[in-house]
Image (spheres, rainbow, N blue to C red):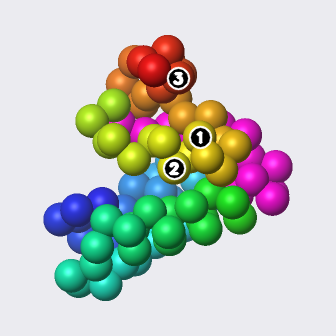
């Protein structure tokens, strides 16, 4: 996440008992680099049986999840993003 220390993310994940998978892009990475890496991560999750994920409504990258076959759910509203299409 932008501007969040890795140590804080790791502590939060441990505190709630969820695994943390980190994805990094280069410091001056393009949106295309981000989308390519994100899709790779989502396809790996799908291969493990993941069918849903959550994201912030402000994140306009949810289309990449749809193309990977994973259904995104808005974190704050707990409703599927596809209702906004």
Q: Which residue is mark 2?
A: 64
Residue 75 located left or right of residue 17? left
* Residue 76 vertical placement versus 71 (above, below): above
* Residue 26 vertical placement versus 3 (above, below): below
Q: Can residue 1 be seen in the rendering of this structure?
A: yes
- Badge 3 or badge 2: first in the primary sequence: 2
Q: Secondary structure at mark 1?
A: helix
Q: Can residue 10 be seen in the rendering of this structure?
A: no
Magenta span of residues: 45-56
Q: Tell me how far mark 1 sits from mark 2, CA to CA.
A: 5 Å
* Residue 32 vertical placement versus 65 (above, below): below
Q: Which residue is mark 3?
A: 82
Where is residue 37 drawn, in percent x and y? Answer: 50, 71
Q: Tell me how far mark 1 sits from mark 3, CA to CA.
A: 9 Å
The residue at the point 54 percent across, 67 percent down is: 21
Residue 10 on the magenta span: no
Q: Secondary structure at mark 2?
A: helix
Q: Which residue is mark 1?
A: 66
Residue 47 on the magenta span: yes
Q: Which mark is residue 78?
A: none
Locate residue 57: give its quadrant: top left
Most foreground residue, 45 or 43:
43
* Mark 1 touches mark 2? (CB < 8 Å): yes
């Amino acid at each position: 996440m932008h501007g969040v220390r890795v140590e804080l993310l790791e502590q939060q994940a441990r505190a709630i008992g969820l695994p943390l998978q980190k994805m990094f892009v280069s410091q001056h990475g393009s949106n295309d680099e981000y989308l390519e890496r994100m899709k790779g991560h989502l396809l790996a999750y799908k291969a493990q049986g993941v069918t849903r994920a959550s994201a912030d409504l402000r994140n306009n990258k949810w289309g990449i999840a749809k193309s990977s076959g994973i259904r995104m759910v808005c974190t704050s509203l707990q409703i599927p993003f596809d209702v906004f299409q």
